[in-house]
């Protein structure tokens, strides 16, 4: 996921985290949305690589993996809260 830059990483990660929060009906602030998107992207990329699936590159690929990973993180956060 090289070539995006730090600012792009923060913007795309924040949008992916925000959209995942909307989909899963969770209310988070902008900082946690960014963390969810960026950390989710790392987790989803690791999962896709472990499953021998191609990890898409570029902005769209980063957004998709960030969104999937953020949804996974929100799911596990809900399980931990119970």
Image (cartoon, helix red, strand yellow):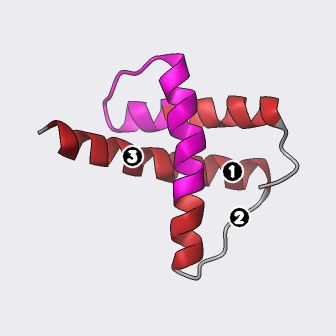
Residue depicted at 58% across the width and 82% down the height: 52
Classed neighbour count for the residue bearing mark 1: other residues with Cα under 10 Å, few (<14), some (14–19), many (≥20)? many
Q: Which residue is mark 1?
A: 62
In this rendering, is residue 71 above or below 81?
below
Which circle's residue, 2 or 1, is located before the other in the chain? 2
Q: Which residue is mark 2?
A: 56
Which circle's residue, 1 or 3, is located before the other in the chain? 1
Q: Which residue is mark 3?
A: 73
Secondary element at tag 1? helix
Q: Which mark is in front, 1 or 3?
A: 3
On screen, residue 79 versus residue 55, left or right, reads left
Determine if the magenta segment contains residue 34.
yes
Q: CA distance from mark 2 to mark 1?
A: 7 Å
Secondary element at tag 3? helix
- Magenta segment: 18-43
Q: Position of residue 78 (x, y in %)?
A: 23, 40
């Amino acid at each position: 996921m090289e070539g995006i830059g730090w600012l792009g990483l923060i913007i795309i990660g924040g949008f992916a985290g925000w959209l995942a929060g909307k989909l899963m009906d969770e209310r988070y602030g902008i900082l946690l949305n960014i963390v969810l998107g960026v950390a989710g992207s790392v987790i989803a990329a690791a999962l896709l690589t472990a499953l021998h699936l191609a990890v898409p590159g570029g902005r769209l690929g980063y957004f998709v993996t960030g969104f999937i990973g953020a949804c996974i993180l929100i799911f596990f956060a809900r399980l931990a809260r119970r």
